[in-house]
Amino acid sequence: TPDEASASFENFTADPPALRQLLEVCLAFVAARKGVLLMVGNTGTGKTHLAIAAMRDLLCRGMSNMVFIKHRTFLAQHWLALRPVAFGQEPPESPLSRCQKASLLVYDELNTASDRRDYEDVLLDLFEFRNGHFKPTIITANVPRAELESVLGTRLFDRLRRAAFAVLEFGFESRRPALNADYLGAAVVEEGILLRRNGITKPILILGGIWGNQVPLFLEHDLTITASSIDK
């Protein structure tokens, strides 16, 4: 988003004041450049802003080969790379190797929208490599700290916990103006589920297309489906 594109430590608003302490930990992580910084909690509380601010600060200090990637983008690109391709065609490259070798990785919006078994092994490959090569990592997740182990799985949770520089919980009310609207819109069903899991009870319209097997998710989380054709 435009706000994220210009995110820096200087333009971060530490309100409520408790955010100042979390900001100080992020600054310490940038100075140390080691371990895993986990930022968890409600949407719209500044986690991604601080992650991008850390990247910007390290870029100014001369660090290169940094990678920012969202959880859903990583999985979509990884699974696409594993699909069979026609004879003579090159398969697309998985982001796994690039993310493993990045000097800094920001892995954004880790969530529970899909079955953990779909991604636990590939995330183990990703983060075990980074931890073993002492590469700093920032992970943001829109879940409470108490639910982190259930999202990551015990194996990955234990590995990240041992390598953690800090675990910061953003248990504050969202500052996103859009969440004060009477009706919300989201691009895909996964985003709608995240809003529901973060306590948003207002009507949510999913603007993107859907697969037939996603209909139960709409019913379970009280999300509104967009009819993209008369047939649907």
Image (tube, helix red, strand yellow):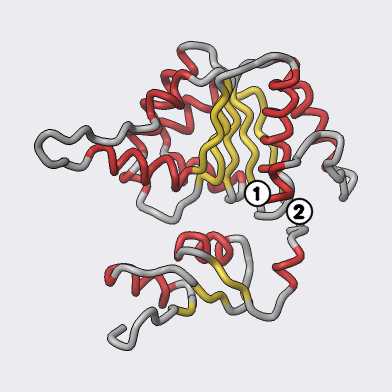
Q: Quadrant of residue 175?
A: bottom right
Q: CA distance from mark 2 to mark 1?
A: 8 Å
Name the residue beneath numbered marker 1: 41
Q: Residues within 10 Å of mark 2 (few under 14, many from 20)?
A: some
Quadrant in which the C terminus appears = bottom left
Q: Residues within 10 Å of mark 1 (few under 14, many from 20)?
A: many
Q: Which residue sits furthest top? A: 133
Name the residue beneath numbered marker 2: 172
| Residue situated in front as seen by the camera: 57 or 129 | 57
> Residue at the location (39% across, 32% down)?
95
Instruction: Residue type at mark 1: give it.
Output: Gly
The correct choice, above or below, for 198 with respect to 50 in the image is below
- Residue 128 visible in the current orientation: yes
Residue 213 horizontal side relative to residue 175, left or right = left
Residue 35 horizontal side relative to residue 218, left or right = right
Q: Quadrant of residue 84?
A: top left
Residue 148 horizontal side relative to residue 24, left or right = left
Residue 61 badge: none
> Residue at the location (41% across, 77% down)?
219
Give residue 80's position: percent from left, percent from top: 29, 43
